[in-house]
Image (cartoon, helix red, strand yellow):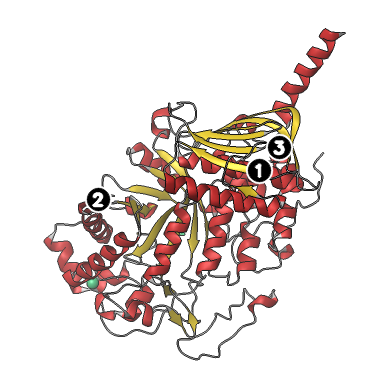
Amino acid sequence: MKNIKKYLLLFMTITSTIYCNAQIIPAPEHLVLVAGTFSFDTKVGMSTKGLTKTDGAKLVSYLSSKIQSQTAVVISSRKERTKNIYLELLTKQNANLGEEGYFLSISSTEISISANSVAGLFYGGQTLLQYIVANNSQTPIQLPNIDITDKPNIAWRGMVMDVSRHFYNVNTIKELLDLMAYYKLNVFHWHLADNEGWRLEIKKYPKLTEVGAWRTEIPGSIFYKKDSTYTQKLDGEPYQYGGFYTQSQIKEVVAYAKDRNITVLPEIDIPGHSGAALTAYPEFSCEKHQQESPNSTLWNGVVKPENINLNYCAGQESTFKFLEDVFTEVIELFPSKYIHIGGDEVDKSYWKKCPRCQQTIKEHGLKDEDELQSYFIKRMAKFLERNDRQIIGWDEILEGGAPANATIMSWRGKKGGIEAAKLKQQVIMAPNNPLYFNRVQEEPKNEPFGEIYSTNTLEKVYNYPLIPSELSTDEAKYIIGGQFAIWTEFISSTEHLKYMLLPRMPAFAENLWSTPRNKNFDRFIERLNQAHYDHWKANGIRFHPKYYKKSVY
Ligand code: ACM
Ligand code: ZN
């Protein structure tokens, strides 16, 4: 009988390892439920070991305030006699955990998180927070005892946020960073400049934000009409709609992100997508004359009027001087090793007509305008390299030849990523299908918000194979990560923004973080229903409801 009990217990432990994921998203690598519970029925101490004083204090302050807000129990920064949370940096690195992995162990009197790095401890803390949220229906909160070993499958897990088409203030950006942290994403790719708006204060060129950050009205696009949040209209009054970040706000966001293990990757898109900058400084375009403001309602990135040039002139030194000055300020603000310089969708017809651009093609023995673009990108890459930074560009920078150590961001499907990996260049996969979250989540006719593009369903995002099967094992090593993107031409409110992100953001996170054996769409939906949808709801966050309260079993 005793033996049967023992085997039954063993069987239950094994099945719980397989089927129980404790409602955590992304699903942890290895998890075992054990007997007992940790009850938040008394003051809990939180202390650190092996961390610098600053790191320790920051982590304790962050985690204790989050836990306290859920449990209503005082978390003291001293060791308590009865119950404690320990955060410990391992003195001997554990190769199995890597840079961002962690151990989390919850017994009846003690919660301990250990890791090789502060990042790992932070992620152990996020898992603990999610576990507390998942168990918050009882008072006091009772945590079933558990042991977790976890680490990410993919190192670079990012989000592209377009703040040019619509400006989002620092508070919203911080909310996005908090959401990213909750789902263990670690790169915030900030698309700061495009045709519709320049969003970054540059001290040397004040008109970039005095002129380039504002537009005449909120686009009254035909695609908006379905939702009442889009009825604002500014009746053509000049310079009313827009905004930008001051340099001190940028530093604040970078620091906020760093405390959440998130690197901010800035993007200044060149040589195309530069209409806002060229409205402010037309002398850096081929025609040099003041053009009709591209950052107006007139076209909103969909139908480009003939008379608008969105490219820098590649045939004059003053353009490069200007851009080097701009990037000098960019690299002072952003510690990221990588700087994104765009390179996508350049309409080269202006360069064809420009005598200076044509002269440059001749002087440098370039074959055509594709090679002129390559010359442009390589010059900027060299400048950034001299300043100890490396460039990332959209996959078009492969046309005409990309700089040798450029990282390629593959957005037009996986083709660019495959080509780059075979050339032994680093790749980040960000294919528009299925990773553009501005596309709707189901049949457009069923969506409350209008959209012109196609559908990227939750299931497609969850199951997307990030590493193209066309690559050999060696080539696949060049795929360093993935990103989803949210382009905001047709998204002007934070409510709509979050609706588009959720629940695709956690689906993407699990796709990249979790090992294939732990991935299962139905169980993902179940966990969303157990502990995520209602958590968002409680925080006033609108999300796509397709699978809400839908049992999949
Ligand atoms: C892009 O969507 N043009 C990168
Ligand atoms: Zn030119």
Place of residue 186 in the rendered image (x, y in percent of width and height, measured from the top left)? 48, 48
Measure how far apart labels 1 and 2 are at the Cα level.
Answer: 45 Å
The C terminus, quarter of image: top right
Q: As displayed, is residue 502 above or below residue 157? A: below
Q: Earlier in the sequence, mark 1 or mark 2?
A: 1
Q: Residue farthest to the front?
A: 81
Q: Position of residue 332 (x, y in %)?
A: 29, 61
Q: Position of residue 350 (x, y in %)?
A: 29, 72
Residue 307 visible to an observer of this rendering: no
Residue topped by disc 3:
22
The vertical placement of 353 against 547, above or below, is below
Q: What amino acid does circle 1 point to?
A: Val
Residue 124 picture quarter: top right
Q: Which amino acid type is shown beneath numbered disc 3?
A: Ala
Residue name at image x 45 percent, y 26 percent: 95
Question: How far apart in space, not on screen, are marks 3 and 1 (Cα)?
Answer: 22 Å
Residue in front for this viewpoint, 389 or 231? 389
Return the residue nearer the eye: 72 or 390: 72
Residue at the spot 46% in from the left edge and 32% down from the top edge? 98
- In terms of image quarters, where does ligand 2 lie? bottom left
Tell which of 397 and 4 is nearer to you: 4
Q: Label 1, secondary structure: give it.
A: strand
Q: Is residue 384 something one can see in this rendering?
A: yes
Q: Which residue is mark 2?
A: 388
Q: Earlier in the sequence, mark 2 or mark 3?
A: 3
Q: Amino acid at mark 2?
A: Asp
**Label 3 SS:** loop
Residue 44: image tag: 1
**Gap between marks 2 and 3, in whole Å?**
43 Å
